[in-house]
Amino acid sequence: GLSFLEHRLAAPPTGLADLTINLITDAAARLNLRREFVRASALAAPGHRSDHLLAICRAVGATHYLSPMGSQNYMTDDGVFEAAGFPV
């Protein structure tokens, strides 16, 4: 069942970011997904908006960025990834 969800939601609130991170890591463990999760704030990536996203991608050694459709407009307008030749 979803006891891991109930467990997280019943715990004292520590903030939405912590709740989200805990739910994602719990779900990944239940699905046997072996990935390292890193907070963007721990990467000290500079910039704003697309510049910041590109800096995060580079900090973790990414070769591509998978973007939701809702981000397409501002990412196209910014032109940062295209100028860097970084696949989106």
Image (cartoon, rainbow, N blue to C red):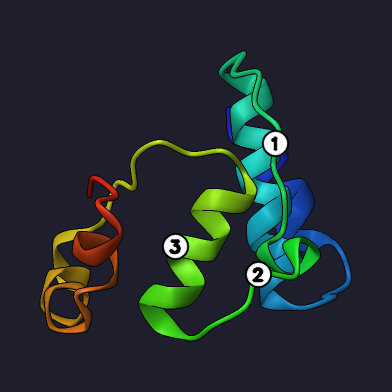
Residue 66 position, x and y percent, is 29, 46
Q: Viewer-proximal residue, 37 or 29? A: 37
Secondary structure under tag 1 reads helix
Image quadrant of residue 81? bottom left
Label 1 Cα crowd, 10 Å radius (few <14 / some 14-19 / many 20+): some
Of badges 1 and 3, nearer the viewer stands 3
**How many angstroms separate mark 1 from mark 2 (CA)?**
26 Å
Residue 4 position, x and y percent, is 71, 38
Q: Amino acid at mark 1?
A: Asp
Of badges 1 and 2, nearer the viewer stands 2
Is there CB contact under 8 Å for labels 2 and 3? Answer: no
For marks 1 and 3, the one nearer the N-term is 1
Q: Viewer-proximal residue, 86 or 17? A: 86
Q: Viewer-proximal residue, 27 or 56? A: 56
Residue 35 position, x and y percent, is 65, 26
Find disc 1 in the rendering and name its residue: 26
Q: Residue at x 14, y 62 (%)?
A: 69
Find disc 2 in the rendering and name its residue: 45
For marks 2 and 3, the one nearer the N-term is 2
Q: Amino acid at mark 2?
A: Ala
How many circles with numbers are drawn on the protein?
3
Is 86 located above or below residue 9 in the figure?
above
For marks 1 and 2, the one nearer the N-term is 1
Is there CB contact under 8 Å for labels 1 and 2? Answer: no
Find disc 3 in the rendering and name its residue: 54
Residue 23 position, x and y percent, is 65, 48
Q: Residue at x 54, y 82 (%)?
A: 47
Q: Residue at x 22, y 82 (%)?
A: 78
**How many angstroms separate mark 1 from mark 3 (CA)?**
27 Å
Is 65 located above or below residue 28 in the figure?
below
Q: Residue at x 74, y 61 (%)?
A: 43
Q: Amino acid at mark 3?
A: Leu
